[in-house]
Each structure stands twice: as structure tokens, then as C-alpha cells.
Image: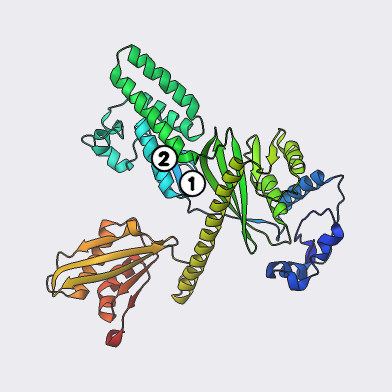
Amino acid sequence: MFGTEDRLLYVGKAKDLKKRLSSYLSINRMSVNVYTMVKQIVRLEITVTENETEALLLEAKLIKSLKPKYNIIMRDDKFYPYILFSKHKYPRIVLHREKRSEGRYTGLYGPFLSSVMTRHIIATIKKAFLLRSCPDNFFATRARPCIEYEIKNCSAPCMQKITEEDYAKAVQMAHKALTGQSKEIQCELFEMMCRFSNNQDYESAIVCRDRLHALKSMKECMGFQTGIHGDVDFIAVYKRQDLYCMQVVFFRDGVNHGSQPYFIESVGNASDADIVNMFMLQIYNDFPSVVYVDLPSDYDTNIMSTAIKKLMKREVDIRLPATRDELKAMGLARNYAMEALNRRVRNTAQDTDLEEFATFFDLLKAPERIEIYDNSHISGTHPYGVMVVCGKDGLLKKEYRKFKINTVTNGDDCSMMHEVISRRFKEIPDVLPDFILIDGGRSQRSAVYGELSRLGIPFACIAKGPDA
């Protein structure tokens, strides 16, 4: 479908061309986006292929190369937890929420839908392989091992309690555990345990035994007891209006290795099967040998299997879930998709609120970090200032700060606010907010104006009554 100046608007395939085109003439049943597209159509171009497989491949090729305005659009999301290994001589393992961190890591696994599950896996990996999770500045300034070493959660590379080579081997084993090679590691650890025991090196044998127990614990945590075996992916579909979530749940060696949500906006009049087909041919390319899709029983899996074979030059078996275990795993994927899309919609609404906030205060862009300040005291005694932080993720409770007032003893609220603002930017100079809200009126504004003007941070004071 082309618009004015021969601009490509949409590419689609159809077994029944008359029926497909007629769907674009039913104005009362169209979504707003489809209606907007239809109004721009100037001409159609039709290409006849030998079969549906060829049509699928041609459609995917044209969309990839020409990027029509109204075909599916990927919507990224960065709020899901990953497991990250830092780029360091002794890498640390941490939970991370931003996928685009190239150059900052040597391994990135996930995303996982639940941060609770992710933290449990990290704790298990630390226990199994004694890896550090401390910040680099903490690592570099240690004078003695920390409590993590004492409770056998870390090998204390900061104090050279382990060689760089042995630590690298432990990291490599952790990578294998997170990529579905746990059976191989368990066999290796069992052999090492027996060898150490036979040589009467019982301390090393106990370390291997504890690692085996930790790996089994991780497998139970990630496996969900679905009865799935081998390397398999499940692709579930959940839709709200024109926004789809394609949730891929990865099973490697029968163990759940997390899931990845893909958010796709469909503007054209495409069916769920069309969206799944385009997703697999355009976006999703890390195919295991078997992939289950969440589609009705009349979906022809052979067409997609053939298309992928031609595209990837290898066999990939596309199936519909049929057994109890397969349906249970697909149900898990479907629940993930529903939760992920609902979260996405909530985040989008929050982004809209922040854009309106930016418009109201005449900011150049929507703020990503807003700090709110207030003071309190009891009849002039026990004075404290507080900082609350919020952003795109809502309230960021880990960023909250409490300031014990040192220089003001008479309950002077303006002087207290001046001290809090001055100390905040002296103690944390590298993290600047996009906007500041202060509980106070004109007097508080005068108290902080000089400092915030110097830093170039926009702010507002909230007051009621005569001070407003």
C-alpha cells in the first residue's frame, strides 16, 4: 500500500486477497490507527507468489528492508532485571535493569520477569562459585575480608585469597550454569569432589559438595517443575488494542532460563498469526530446535517451519502445545506476557504524566529524576531534612536520604533547608536531578535559590496560605 509521493505505508500477505482488502473498507470496525492509514492510501501493488511460505519470506524481506510506516513496530523496555558480570579483573555479579550497557560487562543474562527470582539466582551463584558482588570502589579499598568471606559467600579476591586464574575458572563455571550447561558442571564437580576425597583433601571436597547443592537449588528455582526437557522456547501472545506482547520463555536443558518480552505495535489490520509470523521471521532469530507458539489449533505450523528452514538454513520444529506439561509451560508464558504488557501500559501512562509535568514547568524534556525535600523538628529540637526521589519507575526508595541538621538548633526552617540542599550536592555531586520540589514558600525559595541557580537545576516550592 502506497501513499503520496510513492511512500510505502504497509506490506501484508493474504490467502484471500478480496477478503483482506474488504476488511479495510469497514470503517465502523476499524481502529483509529488503521483508519488513519487507509485515508493515506493512493495505490496498491500486488505480488503473486507460488505458495504461502514464499509469501511469508517475501513479506518479511520487504518489511526489513523498506520499513513501512504502518507495519509492526518494536517497542523496547528496559525495566526488567538481568544478571550482569562486570568488566573487571575479578568480575562482580549483580542485578542490572538496563540492557544497553555495552562495554560494561563480560556477561549479561535475562531478562527475568521477577527481581525476587533474579536475586535468588544471584545469591545461589555467589554461594556456589564464591563470586563477589561488591562495588569496585569498595573492592579497591579493602584492608581485610568483609563479612561475605566470613559466611562463605565470596572468595575474597580483594585480599588475594584466590588467584586470578582460579577466580576466572569460577566465573566461567557460573557462565555455563546460566547458559543451561548445569549437567556438565555437576558432573565435573562430582568428579572433582571424588578426586579430592580420595586424596584426603576434604576441605576442597566440601567446597565441591556445597557447589553441587547450590546448583541443584538454582535448578529447582528456575525449573518451575514443568516437565519440559531439552532446549525449547515457548512464545505466548497477549494483546491490548494495537499493542502486543510477545513473551518468549527459554528452557535450556529442561531448566527455565528466564524470559524476554517483546512489545510490538501493530497498525495494519493483521491477525495474531500474522504478528507471530512476522515476529519469528523479522525479530526473533535465536531459535532452538523446538519452538511452541500460542495460537489456535488451525494454525499451520508446517508453513512457518519451512519458512524458517529456508531463512536459517537449519531445521526448526514449530509446534502447538498439546501435552499437559506443554500447556502448563505455555500458561506460564501467557501469564508473563499479560503481566509484562500491563506493566508496559502503566509505564507508558507514567511517561505521559512526566511529559505533562515537563510542559507545565516549561522543561526541555520529561524529567527522569525528581527530588522532593522537606524538613521536620520537634519544637526546635531533633531537626531533620529528608529527600524523596521519583522517576520513570515511580518512587525510588533506595535513593531516599535523611539529613541530620548540624548547624541549626532553633527550628529555623529556611536555614535548615539551605543546609540540606548544600550538603546534598556536596555529598553526592555526581548525580544531579532534572527537577526539585521543595515543601515551602518564598522564604525557602530565597534560601536555596543561589545554590540551585549555580547548579542550573530547575525547582519549584509548594506552599499554601500567605506564603503561596
Q: How far across and down, in percent of the image, does residue 344 sit?
A: 53, 59
- Residue closest to the far front: 324
In the image, residue 442 above or below residue 150:
below
Q: Residue at x 49, y 25 (%)?
A: 184
Left or right of residue 157: residue 214? right
| Badge 2 element | helix
| Badge 1 element | loop
Left or right of residue 116: residue 378? left
Kind of residue indicated by mark 2: Ile
Q: How far across and down, in percent of the image, does residue 386 sit?
A: 26, 65
Left or right of residue 374: residue 364? right
* Residue 347: mark: none
Q: Where is mark 1, residue-wise?
A: 112
Q: How far across and down, in percent of the image, does residue 167 sit?
A: 36, 28
Kind of residue indicated by mark 1: Phe
* Residue nearest the observer in this picture, 192 or 108: 192
In the image, residue 163 above or below residue 324:
above
Disc on the earlier residue, 1 or 2: 1
Q: Is residue 92 visible?
A: no
Q: Where is mark 2, residue-wise?
A: 121
Q: Are marks 1 and 2 in contact (CB under 8 Å)?
A: yes
